[in-house]
Image: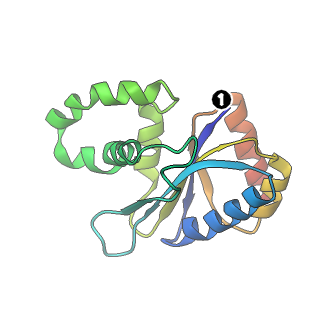
Amino acid sequence: MTTLTVLKFGTPTGAEQVLGVISDLQKQHLITLHDAAIVSWPEGKKKPKTRQLTNMAAAGALSGAFWGMLFGLIFLIPLFGLAIGAAMGAITGSFADVGIDDNFIKSVRDQVHEGDSALFLMTSGAVVDRVADALKNYKFEVIATNLSKEQEDKLREVFSEEA
């Protein structure tokens, strides 16, 4: 099962640092990173910078359009008002098919602000205890995932124990 997870950091560079750790874990075959994107919101900027990270030719990589639409829904739609927001309903329906519902979008929107960064990870096959151990020295919150409620609770539990 492929999982989309969003990790929030209280600094504009935290997501970049942890991506390096995730990449190292992949080299050790402790997690499979299918795709990733970073949102970095430096202090004093009106909107965040976004960047897709993986090679577009990689198997399982998502299109730039996917990330662009997702980040548009999260960070731009509130600025455009209800008319455009209503027109985006069809797009949000497509995202819901892969576990990205209104709650997921709202959760990210409500928690990632100026001065923060977020790491969006599409992963599978994680050796959870080894991944948790590798990330225990980093301060972040798991703010959204398309895991089942039980799986999400377990993920949050693992990382809150490490903090």
The residue sitting at 23% across, 35% down in the picture is 85
How many marks do you count on the picture? 1
Residue type marked 1: Lys
Residue 143 percent across, percent down from the top left: 56, 47
Q: Residue at x 53, y 45 (%)?
A: 61
Residue lying farthest to the left in this orientation: 83
Q: Residue furthest bottom?
A: 44
From the viewer's perspective, tell me whether residue 2 is left or right of residue 118.
Answer: right
Q: Which residue bears the numbered disc 1?
A: 149
Q: In the visual, does 87 lie left or right of 61?
A: left
Q: Nearer the viewer, residue 28 or 99?
A: 28
How far across and down, in percent of the image, does residue 124 sit?
69, 41
Task: Quadrant for the C terminus, please.
Answer: bottom right
Q: Counting other residues with Cα less than 10 Å from the Cα at mark 1, is it few (<14), some (14-19), or many (20 or more)?
A: few
**Horizontal arrangement in the rendering, residue 134 relative to residue 57 (left or right):** right
- 5 versus 85 height, above or below: below
- Rendered location of residue 89, percent (x, y): 28, 27
- Secondary structure at badge 1 equals helix
Residue positioned 65% across, 68% down in the render: 20
Q: Is residue 163 visible?
A: no
Q: Is the image coloured rainbow, by chain, by secondary structure, or in one colour? A: rainbow
| Quarter of the image where the N terminus is located | top right
Residue 15 is situated, as x and y percent measured from the top left of the image, at 56, 65
Q: In this rendered view, identify the residue nearer to me: 21 or 155.
A: 21
Residue 38 horizontal side relative to residue 69, left or right: right
Residue shown at 51% from the left, 29% from the top: 98
Q: Nearer the viewer, residue 150 or 132?
A: 132
Q: Is residue 151 visible?
A: yes
Instruction: Name the quadrant containing residue 5.
Output: top right
